[in-house]
Amino acid sequence: MRYGLLLVLGLLLCRLQVCAQSAPDSAQRPGIQVHAYAEAYYAADLGTSQKQTRPLFFNFNQQRQFSINLALVEVCGQMADYRFRVTPALGTYMQANYGGEPEGFRYLFEANAGVRLSPKRNVWLDAGILPSPYGYEGAVSLFQNTLTRSLAAEYSPYFLTGARLSAPLGAGFTGSFYLVNGWQIIRETNRSPSAALQLQYQPTDKWLLNYSTYLGNERQQADTASRARAMRHYHNLYAVYTPDSKTTWVALADFGLQNGYHSSPRAWWTAHLTCRRQLAPRWQANARAEVFADPHHAHIYFQPYRTTFYGASLGAGYGWPGQALLRLEARSLRAQDAVFTDEAGAATRWNYMLTTALSVYW
């Protein structure tokens, strides 16, 4: 509670603006800045009228009630050869994604510090709770093509805890190497560090290509049933195409392989395509088509059901550039097996959702 009170006080006292979560940004304005963001939402799963947690999701996961998905205050500093960022936060997203962490870390959205190792080559070393290099979607939905997150984003890390070495590689390439505690965790759980790599290529202002990979042991230290490593191999690829100032296309594909304790490796994969179009100075529209396939429960456990989903969404938004955005989104999911329930409580393969949210930053 004390963390929540501090955050609310910060939101009330600061007249600020929010920075988008992104890869290392060495071009920030010098000095210390304070930013704030708040996002309230109402979500309705059309298959039930009960107040409950929506399955599959970490963002906007409470339905039939008004909730705060994410509210944060960010303090960041940028000097010639060092930088830092500390972001306390609260909301249902924080409860879902940070609930298993020690008490003192459950309200830290990000916290990291960096030093420039080579001013000539712009090589940075950052350490702490860092933004994830996987996919183009972050938890701050104001900067995303769609209101809700794709299944690819929900089941890949939003953050990593450890160290990151980043540098421009020339000819439009940028590279980052990570040594981290594990797959979206703050506290280490098995004494086996994991590694991640990100490569970005921007040939023109219209195109951005990204490849990221992860390799780590996901066996929990408390699991004494087997000493075998549960190695996870994950690969993420996406492309962002911005043909003009009003349109953004993103195509994404990823593939993961999880070694089990007593079985052969099991795979999952995802893909989606999104588009956002600015229709007028204050109006925008967006659409998404996606597939998430995990038929052998490598990543999502819905035993005995097969966890393959096909989804689509349509959304619209009205906002004031630099101030606020009100959005509405309709989303549907079709599962390979009947993992959802309808209004009568019967099993069904279909799920329909409506979500609206107001995002404000200052």
Image (cartoon, rainbow, N blue to C red):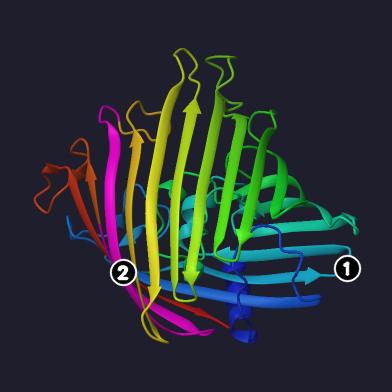
Q: Earlier in the sequence, mark 1 or mark 2?
A: 1
- The residue pinned by badge 2 equals 315
The part of the chain drawn in magenta is: 303-331
- Pinpoint residue 86: horizontal percent, then vertical percent: 71, 64
Residue 270 on the magenta segment: no
Please say whether residue 244 is visible from this viewpoint: yes
Tell me: 64 left or right of 18. left
* Local SS, label 1: loop
Specify the quadrant that holds the C terminus. Answer: bottom right
Query: Is the C-beta separation of discs 1 and 2 under 8 Å?
Result: no
* Local SS, label 2: strand
Front-most of residues 4 and 43: 43
Residue 305 on the magenta segment: yes
Tag of residue 219: none
Q: What's the residue type where badge 1 is placed?
A: Ala
- The residue pinned by badge 1 equals 80
| Structural distance between the alpha carbons of marks 1 and 2 | 41 Å
Front-most of residues 186 and 19: 19
